[in-house]
Amino acid sequence: MNVGLVILTALLFGLVLVAIRRSEDPGPIIQRAIEQFAVLVPRMVCALIAAGFIAQLIPKETIAGFLGEDAGLAALPIAAAAGLIVPAGPVIAFAIAAVFARAGASTPALITFISAWSIFAAHRMLIYELPLLGLSFLRLRLLSAGVVPFLAGLLAYLVGLAVSVAPQLTTL
């Protein structure tokens, strides 16, 4: 069983117990849950189908070649560029990340991809930031936060190196 599912289930049961203890009217709670279910489930179905198409359109060898362990640090800018151009919310972005992971992308590349998508997402910059906050704000934000995905990926790479070397040091 997935650890995330276990945590979310425990959190749900905890919230149900709090609601029961506070004698809350379950009507609005159930209504909100149904609304969320109706909004999220169709999105997730579409995202998973889209991720399946992506998995079929981009050969695994290509993904592994550009984003895999053998690509090394060169995978980080490629992953950042991919994160920049994914024009979607978390349901699709994480489904794409899952496709990348199954195709052999390295953990540092996945961390860079998700970080770049979180920080840069071109659709958010073009639809919200540029028209609402202006070019000077966007420029300053990109300059100040531009290195974060690369640092996150580099840190993951270094931690992975340290973890892989540590068992070898103890045997010496």
Image: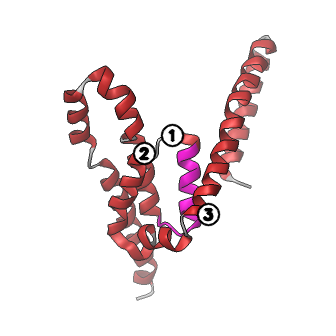
Left or right, 26 with respect to 146, comes to right
Foreground disc of the pair 1, 2: 1
Q: Position of residue 75 (x, y in %)?
A: 37, 65
In magenta segment, residue 22: no
Q: Are marks 1 and 3 in contact (CB under 8 Å)?
A: no
At label 3, counting other C-alpha atoms closer than 10 Å, the crowd grade (few under 14, some 14-19, many 20 or more) is few
Foreground disc of the pair 2, 3: 3
Q: Position of residue 10 (x, y in %)?
A: 72, 39
User: If you read the primary sequence from the N terminus, does the residue marked by circle 2 or circle 3 appear first?
Assistant: 3
Q: Quadrant of the N terminus?
A: bottom right
Q: Is residue 116 above or below residue 131?
A: below
At label 1, counting other C-alpha atoms closer than 10 Å, the crowd grade (few under 14, some 14-19, many 20 or more) is some
Q: Helix, strand, or loop for circle 2?
A: helix
Q: Foreground residue, 150 or 142?
A: 142
Q: Name the residue at 69% across, 26% down.
A: 36
Q: Name the residue at 33% across, 27% down.
A: 129
Residue behind mark 2: 117
Q: Quadrant of the C terminus?
A: bottom left
Foreground disc of the pair 1, 3: 3
User: Magenta residues?
Assistant: 92-106
